[in-house]
Image: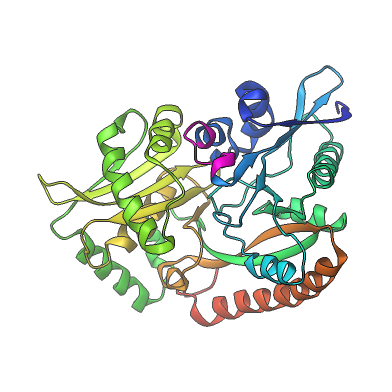
Amino acid sequence: MTAVKAEVRVHRRIAEIGRDAWDACAAPFGDPFVSYDFLNALEESGCAVERTGWAPHHLSVEDDDGRVAAVMPLYLKSHSQGEYVFDHSWADAYERAGGRYYPKLQCSAPFSPVTGPRLIVRPDIDIDDGRSALLGGALTLCERLNASSLHVTFPKADEWEWMGERGLLRRQDQQYHWFNNGYATFDDFLAALSSNRRKTIRRERRDAQAGLEIVSLTGDQLTEDHWDAFFGFYMDTGGRKWGRPYLNRAFYSLLGERMADKVLLILARRPGGPWIAGALNLIGADCLYGRHWGCSEDVPFLHFELCYYQAIEHGIRLGLPRVEAGAQGQHKIARGYLPSPVYSAHWIADPALRDPVARYLEREREAVSAEIEALTEDYSPFRQTP
């Protein structure tokens, strides 16, 4: 294994590291959300920048030959929006007690509640050395910037365990994921369900598709007209859910320009008419990630069709073992998406806040694990739980 240097560099733009150097570390994971093009598009479009409360402070470590050996997507945050791991109550309690919670450091793929690598080490580098250098650099940066805390959200399970062994507080939550247990077709998946669930899903798909044209687009099939339509859906959904959507129109153009082969955009319309609904997915090496959805017309079950059933069909077609359909939503269980653990790790400088949070997280982990077990046992739609 190649050795790493002790020096950690801080970069205010990912472009300072460069695509080749960043992706030499990130590309082997096949995760679109930590790719250079995705993170750079967020910066170039003005979505993840200091003005929006996401000031890039990415870390890099070099090897003995001066090549980038490990990287960490890191942001100095002035709020807790767009993270999907909620620490608002921590901030409120600390500030009511006279502390200052912001700024804080956030290691994540902005606005994306998807599990992936966070301490990203080049394959030929000793993974412990690379991770240790990055984590040590982030904690040093916390001290230098007088940040209250470091938060690593949606890391892979092995990273979560590794950080816990090094003193970070471990938090567990749940999402709903679909797993391909050897299905070659959508009907194979249906055959694994109880009779009632099979009938319900077939009826929902029939009602959703009635009188509609559903089109799946990727690569050079995507046009700016498609992005115009989808952005309208995204703005409507975001405005109703959280008031101010995080992404802008420029981001989607950059996504289509630079990552079209990783995009699966599913749109629906009445024949000859305008698009009335859409769902955006990103394609990873081992997962189809459902991200955004919206519509301009309410059609019964169309949300389930575009976001869940079409995703399963395409996941099977692409040979992917997993589909992640985003955060929240127990209704996904009945559609074959089972509760699955997701993780975050937290370092809090002040013991007056760290100690009560640690006690809370211990109880929370137990409760989440028990809920996952109960939901799977009591509500699984499968004849035999995979």
Identify the residue at image location x=76%, y=55%: 149
Whether residue 184 can be seen here: no
Quadrant of the drawing holding the C terminus? bottom right
Instruction: In the displayed orientation, state which residue is furthest to the front.
Output: 98
Q: Answer above or below: position of 141 versus 326.
A: above
Q: Answer above or below: position of 52 versus 101.
A: above
Identify the residue at image location x=50%, y=47%: 320
* Residue 72, horizontal then vertical, whole percent: 71, 38
Instruction: In the displayed orientation, state which residue is furthest to the top.
Output: 65
Residues 37 and 246: in front is 246
* Residue 9, horizontal then vertical, whole percent: 78, 30
* Magenta stretch in the rendered image: 42-51
The image's colouring method is: rainbow
Q: Quadrant of residue 261?
A: top left
* Residue 29, horizontal then vertical, whole percent: 63, 38
Residue 381 lies in the magenta-colored region: no
Identify the residue at image location x=80%, y=48%: 146
Identify the residue at image location x=58%, y=37%: 30
Q: Quadrant of residue 215?
A: top left
Residue 45 lies in the magenta-colored region: yes
Residues 354 and 135: in front is 354
